Image: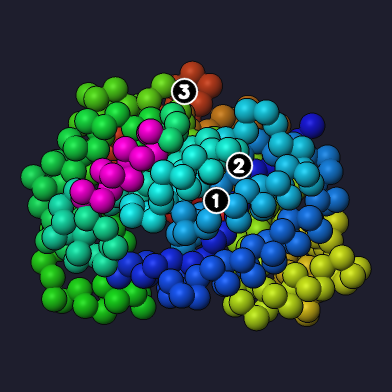
Amino acid sequence: MRELSIYIHIPFCVRKCLYCDFLSFPVQEGQRTERISSYGNLLKREIEEAADRYGDYQVVSVFWGGGTPSLLPAETLAGIMETLYGSYRVVADAEITIEANPGTVTADGLRGYITAGINRISIGLQSTDDEELTRIGRIHDYHTFLETYELARAAGFRNINIDLMAALPGQSVSSYRKTLERAAALKPEHISAYSLILEEGTPLYERQDDYRFPTEEEDREMYLLTDAFLSACGYHRYEISNYALDGYECRHNKVYWQRGHYAGFGLGAASMVENVRWSNPATFGEYEAYTAGLGHGDGDTDGDGDADEDGRQQEHTQKAGSYPARQVLTREEQMEEFMFLGLRMMCGVSPAEFEKLFGRRIEDVYGDVLCRLYRQELLVRVSDRIRLTARGIDVSNRVMAEFLLD
């Protein structure tokens, strides 16, 4: 049976972080219960109506992302999980993750999440320096994070991820080292460590001249420090920005990097099944109209998409109740994604798998590119796999761009 991962998007947050360009919206506490309840009903309808499309799949992971999913009351989440379990084949050992912001959970709520089936929690720490947290608009301080982490352990979570960020405004190499030391000392099963990217249109992007950001040399030093320090603490790097103790790699995120099947539910959620990609409406009004029309027979709901003889995308007009506009990936686009997503993982890509999927030897498609990157010592072939070298990881964006086909 084919495997499917499910992403559930919760767009609500207490306050939008200054660097955030995700699809999320602050919601006042007085309006929160009503808005979350209404949105939860829309989610349940979408999840139920899509079930027939995935009858031949078994669900191996579920990821509650946002926004701040931990704003959901446990009973609301449990109701949506009940709908999910009742509509899909969810394997007994499925990895089910919820993202949480420090200060947005309670002991009872966390226990309720576990009762509902959540078995992994990802806590957004970012930094242990309170001044750095304030500069990027986080709602918590380090002490609040520690309380949240301890509550999660006490509730019974045995698989915890901590999110960290480098290259923050006002951050130094020494302050980042302290963040790494404090995070690793807690022995979470997983650590994600990303460098801040200033996204145009965010408040931090507009105010960047008000801050001193780490230099390129300092940013690189933080980057190298992350790998060296976490490796020494027993974490293995399995993706460019992700580290895990043995047996705790994130199954859900690996689906993205390995081009597996995933279905997204909720506002703006993205899906990719059988090389067809689509996204849900990104405004509440459009999403409500879309879910209201589900099950009425409008649009193509079989998930196979429509393409001309060259595999190029056909345009679809989106209307209330219709299936969102889809992109049918061409064979060339599939090859590109196989390479630049797969190379993000430390194990790299398999030439044998490439040939099995596409009916062509990887050298026949990318021979010149591979030879050039081998000579530049950015890629290496070890046994039956091709992967980035340490030098290649440093310039990974440049390496990935080499695999775009004309």
**Residue at (39% x, 67% y) in the render:** 14
Element marked by disc 3: loop
Q: CA distance from mark 1 to mark 2?
A: 8 Å
Disc with the residue nearer the chain's start (3 vs 1) = 1
Query: Dot 2, crowdedness within 10 Å: few (<14), some or many (≥20)?
Result: some
Colouring convention used in this rendered image of the protein: rainbow
Q: What residue lies at 48% left-to-right and 48% top-to-bottom?
A: 109
Q: Mark 1 or mark 2: name the one nearer the start of the chain.
A: 1
Q: Identify the element where label 2 is drawn.
A: helix
Observer-nearest of 274 and 41: 41
**Residue 34, quarter of the rendered image:** bottom right
The Cα–Cα distance between marks 3 and 2, rounded to whole angstroms, is 23 Å
> Which numbered disc covers residue 74?
1
Question: Dots 1 and 2: beta carbons under 8 Å?
Answer: yes
**The disc labelled 1 sits on which kind of residue?**
Ala
Q: Is residue 161 visible?
A: no
Residue holding disc 3: 247
**Mark 1, secondary structure of its residue:** helix
Residue 58 part of the magenta-drawn span: no
Q: Position of residue 396 (x, y in %)?
A: 36, 46
Location of residue 202 in the rendering, given as x and y in whole percent from the top left corner: 34, 75
Amino acid at pointer 3: Gly
Q: Residues within 10 Å of mark 1 (few under 14, many from 20)?
A: many
Q: Which quarter of the image is occupied by the N terminus?
A: top right
Question: Which residue is denoted by mark 2 in the rendering?
Answer: 116
